[in-house]
Amino acid sequence: MIRSLVIADELKKRGNEILFTTTKVRKSFINKAGYEVFGEGHSEVNLNDEKDQSINYFRNNRRIFIDWLFDELDAAAKFKPDIVVNSPSFFGPLIKHRYGVPYVTVLNAQWLSHFRGLLGIGKARDIFSHSILRRILKPIFRHQFEKIYLEEIRNFYKILNVPNAPNTQIDLHAFNPVLIPSIREFEPIQPDERDDVHFIGPLFWKGFENLSFDMNKLFGDPRKPLIYVGLGGSIFRQDVYRKMIDLFQSNKQWNVIMSIGPNFERNTFPKDTDNFVLKQYVPGLKVAEQSKVVVNTASHGTVMQALWHGKPLVVIPHNIDQGTIAARISELGLGINLNAVSILDFSKREKYFLKAVQVNPKKIVNSVKIVLSSPEFSRRAEAISKYFRKYHNSAEIAADYIELYAKRLKR
């Protein structure tokens, strides 16, 4: 949602008219950002449901997904857009297949069939052992993906009466341009013949960055090292937050700022102390810039904020896409991954959540201490930040491609 707002802001500035589809819960947020939302919003989908982390989630919650997809199709039919921008496009270009509307997806590279690493466990380095593992495991994952996940996607196409349902993993994103909001050095893909897959660099929303952040006003002693803990929307259990809050509050050697995202109200948690501040949302780029270490679930947005400023990370991924990002952080030496899932479990989505909530908060604090005392983590993070900084105008790059494809693909 956030990176869609970044692109929308740039397109709106150029005089384009924007319509969003989103959930009932997030509709007011989009409205406050200055955009119209189609209808009343669709049902909320919790892909991190602690009671159902398996691939069966699609089957068990089919009604919710159908509500979501009908919302998008109905919006396209009534709004008659020149182009659809979808993020992250779990189901492929349904609207393109139904109405022939040009379609661009904003997608993390790991979901492409030619992502160099392995979903969930990484192994994307240019070394012999990683090459062998990729050669062995990629066909296995592709078979499982097409047998289970893709079969559910095909069912959605059938229910919605949309043609051209994907038959292979490649088909899912083969019929639309892809914008990757990252850099090749962090999310590598194999070379292929496609010329419509573009790295555009990370997308940071100015709406959050307009929030104030002043160390001198927030903390009793602003000279202490700042630790940024961004748990965001991936966690739906208050006890997970509370354990971390108790531990960080009792650790007086650091200043800690924690963002909790949209799932809970701020007033349901303990009050701030002179070394611990809790907020729903923070200006992530500003906070990351002043932080020594960033702790999060390996969510893409916060990881991009940290690496943009060359800050090392401690990550606890809660799902398979976060697991891929966390594995990449570990293999590049940019931080510590506290929830690495084994090769035997890499395709089992439920394993990530179950293991993540069992991570001892003391282990998180100890990992922060290790990263703080090991200069090589910061050195590597600062080195890769130079590649990120080359994309200082990512929103403009994205908007350029979208306007280009709106004209080119409509012919």
Image (cartoon, helix red, strand yellow):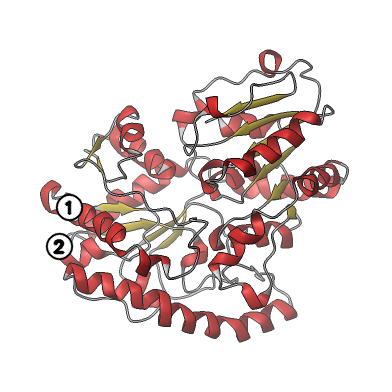
Classify mark 2: helix, strand or loop. helix
The residue type indicated by label 1 comes to Ala
Which residue is at 27% across, 74% downward?
155
Q: How many marks?
A: 2
Q: Position of residue 327 (x, y in %)?
A: 67, 62
Please say if 364 is above or below 245: below
Residue 399 marker: none
Image quarter of the N terminus:
top left
The residue at which mark 2 appears reads as 99
The residue type indicated by label 2 comes to Tyr
Classify mark 1: helix, strand or loop. helix
Sequence-earlier tag: 2 or 1:
1
Which residue is at 61% across, 84% downward?
135
Image position of 309 (left or right of 93): right
Image position of 6 (left or right of 329): left
Marks 2,1: beta carbons within 8 A: yes
Question: How would you rate the neighbour count of disc 2 (Cα within 10 Å): few for under 14, some for 14-19, many for 20 or more?
Answer: few
The residue at which mark 1 appears reads as 76
Specify the quadrant of the image occupied by residue 127: bottom right
Q: Nearer the viewer, residue 17 or 350?
A: 350
